Amino acid sequence: MIAVRIGGGEGELVGYAKNVVELVSPISFAPGQPARFEVAELSLEGRSLGSRKRDDGRFTVRFRLISLRREERERLESMASG
């Protein structure tokens, strides 16, 4: 599990592919809503593609990343691949 800080709480990275990151979040995000979050040492910014409530009360949220640098993309790819 890779820890994520988002919305004043803790979550986890589920996956990353083609400039879209999927996270587990303690709060939901409406489609198009901007958000900032931290994955490991990376500080990222994205716009929500939508949220889905999980059985544990948290939310699976997909974000389209904004202004992602090559180094950040490569780091996310390596984290997501395990």
Image (spheres, rainbow, N blue to C red):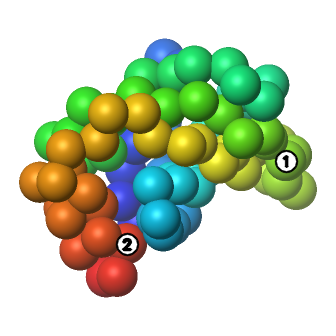
Can you say which quadrant of the picture contains the C terminus? bottom left
Q: Which residue is mark 1?
A: 52
**Looking at the picture, does residue 33 appear above or below residue 41?**
above
Q: Residue at x 16, y 54 (%)?
A: 70
The tally of labels here is 2
**Looking at the picture, does residue 63 appear above or below residue 35?**
below
Q: Residue at x 79, y 41 (%)?
A: 51
Q: Residue at x 57, y 19 (%)?
A: 34
Q: Which mark is residue 7?
A: none
Query: In the depicted view, which residue is nearer to us: 21 or 39?
Result: 21
- Outermost residue, bottom side: 82
Q: Position of residue 28 (x, y in %)?
A: 75, 29
Assess disc 1: are there few (<14), some (14-19) or many (≥20) residues with their C-alpha within 10 Å of its C-alpha. some
Q: Which residue is mark 2?
A: 80
Q: Residue at x 78, y 30 (%)?
A: 31
Quarter occupied by residue 19: bottom left
| Res. 78 visible in picture | yes
In the figure, is residue 77 to the left or right of 32?
left
Q: Hey, what amino acid is under mark 1?
A: Arg
Assess disc 2: are there few (<14), some (14-19) or many (≥20) residues with their C-alpha within 10 Å of its C-alpha. some
- Label 2: which secondary element: helix
